[in-house]
Amino acid sequence: MHARWMPILLVAAAMAFYGCNPPQADTPEITPPRAVTTRLVKPRDLPVMLSAVGHLVSNREVVVSAEVAGIVQSYHVEMGGAVKEDQTVVTLDPRDYRLALNEARANLSAAQARFAAARNSFQRAAQLLPERVITPETYDRIEAEHKAARASVSQAEAVVDINQRRFDKTVIKAPFGGLVIRRLVETGQNLDAGDPVMAIADMQPMRVKIHINEQDYVLLDADDPVSVRVEAFPDQRFDGRVDRIGVKADAQTNTFEVEILVANPVLRLKAGLTATVLITVDEIEDAVMIPQDSVLYREGRTEVFVVTDQGTAKVRKVKLGRVEGASVRILAGLAAGERLVTAGGPYLKDADRVVVVEP
């Protein structure tokens, strides 16, 4: 009897309990504002730059050679030494050439003496011929001797000039100012004509050869501003200028060769160093640039958040443009004067309340 009525009594007791204590209604949960950092979007002029990597080479480089045979008497500069234009770098033993020059000069003096005598004879013959003191045949012979003596003088003068040039070439000079990058002779060495003696490089300025694609090539002008960064001097930029622009693309790489001159007034730059060339080919006025890490990539969309005057986050779909370092240009979707969320964006939803904190 008691067991049969027990479930009914329990249900009744439960109904009485809940009737006296009805359940409380759910209260909506208030989400606290999200902390974000922001920055004001300000337009600025954006230089359009092309960048290319190359290696520094000397502006000019030449191997100076002996023009006459001889024995090296002395050299006057070592590897790494500076030379000026027309400075003597190597001297050959000049004695044989001096003797040949003296002999040529003596022969010239003898030829001039013979010519003087022949000229006097010819002048007398010219006076005697009208008086028929000499025959026409004699006059012709004297005239021929006069012409031959004059030709002998010209020949002797040419021989003197030749020997003078050979003598002068025993002093080997630098064709331009620069640095000696190799010394190729020793004192006492016997040289033939054409043997190399010194390698000299002009390093003021230096030169960089770069290759650019056809898209950048059409933007390039000879007067575009150029700066050069060298890996060996990361904190310094060097002034440069466009010197030569190729007119034909390489058949294999489809790139154009461009040569850049780089200022090197104190000779810090050396051949072989790696250089990055930056050429400003254009400038975009009032470009909207924002940090790349403030852009959100969601399901194929590129978005940013801005903070409204009401203190809420507003999502903006943006179109990206040129990248410059850590910044990217915004082509559409964001205007100057808006307050961009730079940190905290990944945790936001549209219309979330936000509080701006200092970075």
Image: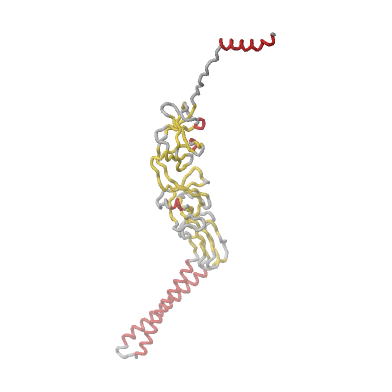
Asked if one can make out residue 206 in the rendered structure from this viewpoint, the answer is: no
Q: Residue 52: where, in percent of width, then height?
A: 49, 49
Asked if one can make out residue 172 in the rendered structure from this viewpoint, the answer is: yes
108 lies left or right of 252: left
Q: Nearer the viewer, residue 303 or 45?
A: 303
Q: Is residue 232 above or below residue 253?
A: above
Residue found at x 45% / y 38%: 318
Question: What scheme was used to colour the molecule?
Answer: secondary structure
Q: Residue 359: where, in percent of width, then height?
A: 48, 30
Q: Is residue 46 above or below residue 142?
A: above
Q: Nearer the viewer, residue 202 or 330?
A: 330
Q: Is residue 252 above or below residue 1?
A: below
Q: Is residue 74 above or below residue 337?
A: below
119 lies left or right of 97: left
Q: From this viewpoint, which residue is outermost toward the top? A: 2
Q: From this viewpoint, which residue is outermost toward the left? A: 131
Q: Nearer the viewer, residue 216 or 124?
A: 216
Q: Residue 42: where, in percent of width, then height?
A: 41, 35
